[in-house]
């Protein structure tokens, strides 16, 4: 029976046969169902790479046990459906934090590997995949591969960032990062335009583990102006509190009948947010608000209304193209949240990893025809600059652009499980 499945953007809509996988021993009906299969973690992706419309999803929320935790070395082995939230509830009280984390803690371990997610520390820590020691990959032919940098190394590289297509990751061994407590020494700096952003980033990357910026793309004043946020883990021996992030604190009760976000409300929000901050503010803050500000509002995506939202995230190698994207995004009609991050130059952990050298810009739009018609222009700027779009956030890049962004895509083909597929993969590889 097909059930409706949503990603975090609530676009596109999709229906699948749901097959909960609750243990590693569980039989999966690969031979009994004449459909393709795709693992599905927490559905926090904002595109169709976690969807398999008309086919089956192997849902992993029940595959969520801790298998082993060495609190002396910070080595964790856990089943792939466990969330970052659950990992932190175990590890932070014992002095260990995630080596890399995206902007929400409600992602699964398997989903983080399959998208090779990045965080605010890409410039010094690379991506999540750089911290994965090994994992078990279950294939539809009944085989299991233990994959690491030394064992089945090609499978290891293909599965990190492999979009769930190489098989079901059953468990992952991960190296965590030591922390003295659960606080961050943070600093927020108001900056006037994109050149100031680059200058701030340059002075920050050698001194701060985390650096990111929120930009106002609506006011038309100071291209890319915004708030630069940087931080390090607090090391004060007097500060002993080791608490995992909590919340959400604000619930969004249902889907709004229309989008609350229009150009008018967005413009006021962006200007007020920018001006209300002091030009420079230092604070010691808990991990939660620093890493996961959006998690404090439950299902925040519902404020985008019944048609959902479109998120666009590109990796843009040149400063000129960054300017072009920011200028074009202002014209598109407004991004509620624009996030900029300069990435480091570490070689990607996975064959199809999104991250690489350049600036990533992520833009949020309420879903509308206007965005659907205008967005390809942004895609083309990225393609011309030699960058790429993030499949985890995409529901509509063209197949032609996908092949330009990921010229190595055919190298993934030998590793794709013959029974696995996704809505994303069918869309971008269709002739
Ligand atoms: C508020 C918010 C902030 C975010 N911030 C960031 C960010 O800063 N950086 C970033 O990189 N991403 C970010 N993301 C995107 C998110 O981190 C990724 O989409 C992540 O992969 C979602 O994990 P999931 O468990 O929800 O996986 P899903 O969305 O369910 O699936 C993602 C992919 O993983 C595959 N998969 C899932 N489980 C398995 C498994 N067991 N075996 C094999 N494949 C599997 C799926 O097939 C799919 O291809 C953000 C998302 C949100 C909602």
Image (cartoon, rainbow, N blue to C red):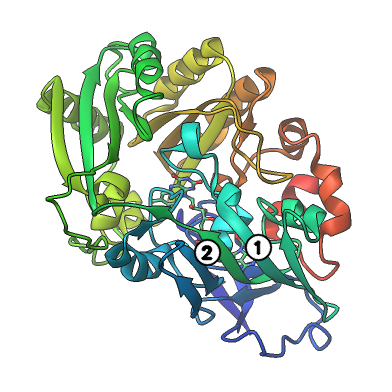
**The N terminus lies in which quarter of the figure?**
bottom right
Q: Position of residue 83 (x, y in %)?
A: 44, 67
Residue 350 vertical placement versus 283 (above, below): below
Residue 354 vs residue 403: left or right?
A: left
Tag of residue 134: 1
- Determine which quarter of the picture holds residue 53: bottom right
- The outermost residue toward the right is 414
Looking at mark 2, is its residue's CB closer than 8 Å to ligand 1?
yes
Residue 338 or residue 243, whichever sits in front: 243
Report, in whole angstroms, how far the alpha carbon at label 2 lies from the one at label 1: 12 Å
Residue 154 vertical placement versus 141 (above, below): above
Tag of residue 334: none
- Determine which quarter of the picture holds residue 167: bottom right
Mark 2 vs 1, N-terminal side: 2
Q: Position of residue 136 (x, y in %)?
A: 69, 71
Residue depicted at 27% across the width and 52% down the height: 180
Residue 221 or residue 136, whichever sits in front: 136
Residue depicted at 51% across the width and 82% down the height: 62
Q: Position of residue 118 (x, y in %)?
A: 50, 44
Residue that badge 2 annotates: 109
């Amino acid at each position: 029976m097909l059930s409706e499945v949503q990603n975090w953007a609530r676009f596109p809509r999709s229906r699948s046969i749901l097959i909960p996988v609750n243990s590693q021993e569980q039989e999966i009906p690969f031979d009994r169902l004449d459909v393709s299969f795709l693992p599905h973690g927490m559905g926090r992706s904002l595109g169709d790479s976690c969807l398999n419309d008309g086919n089956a999803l192997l849902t992993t929320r029940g595959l969520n046990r801790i298998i082993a935790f060495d609190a002396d070395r910070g080595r964790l082995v856990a089943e792939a459906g466990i969330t970052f939230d659950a990992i932190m509830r175990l590890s932070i009280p014992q002095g260990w934090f995630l080596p890399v984390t995206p902007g929400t803690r409600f992602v699964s371990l398997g989903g983080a590997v399959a998208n090779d997610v990045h965080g605010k520390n890409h410039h010094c820590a690379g991506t999540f995949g750089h911290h994965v020691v090994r994992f078990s990959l279950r294939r539809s032919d009944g085989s299991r591969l233990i994959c690491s940098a030394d064992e089945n190394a090609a499978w290891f590289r293909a599965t990190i960032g492999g979009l769930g297509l190489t098989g079901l990751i059953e468990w992952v061994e991960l190296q965590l990062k030591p922390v003295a407590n659960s606080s961050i020494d943070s600093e927020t700096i108001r900056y006037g335009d994109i050149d100031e952003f680059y200058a701030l980033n340059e002075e920050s990357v050698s001194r701060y583990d985390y650096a990111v910026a929120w930009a106002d793309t609506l006011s038309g004043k100071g291209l890319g102006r915004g708030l630069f946020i940087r931080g390090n883990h607090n090391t004060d021996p007097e500060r002993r509190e080791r608490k995992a992030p909590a919340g959400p604190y604000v619930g969004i009760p249902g889907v709004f009948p229309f989008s609350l976000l229009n150009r008018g409300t967005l413009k006021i929000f962006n200007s007020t947010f920018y001006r209300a901050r002091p030009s420079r503010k230092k604070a010691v803050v808990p991990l939660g608000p620093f890493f996961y500000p959006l998690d404090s509002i439950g299902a925040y995506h519902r404020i985008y209304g019944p048609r959902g939202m479109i998120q666009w995230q590109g990796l843009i190698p040149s400063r000129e193209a960054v300017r072009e994207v920011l200028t074009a995004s202002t014209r598109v009609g407004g991004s509620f949240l624009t996030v900029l991050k300069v990435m480091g130059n570490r070689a990607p952990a996975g064959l199809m990893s999104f991250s690489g050298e350049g600036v990533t810009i992520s833009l949020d739009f309420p879903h509308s025809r206007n965005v659907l018609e205008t967005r390809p222009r942004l895609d083309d700027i990225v393609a011309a600059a030699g960058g790429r779009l993030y499949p985890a956030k995409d529901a509509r890049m063209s197949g032609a652009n996908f092949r330009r962004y990921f010229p190595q895509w055919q190298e993934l083909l030998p590793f794709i499980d013959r029974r696995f597929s996704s809505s994303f993969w069918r869309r971008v590889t269709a002739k």
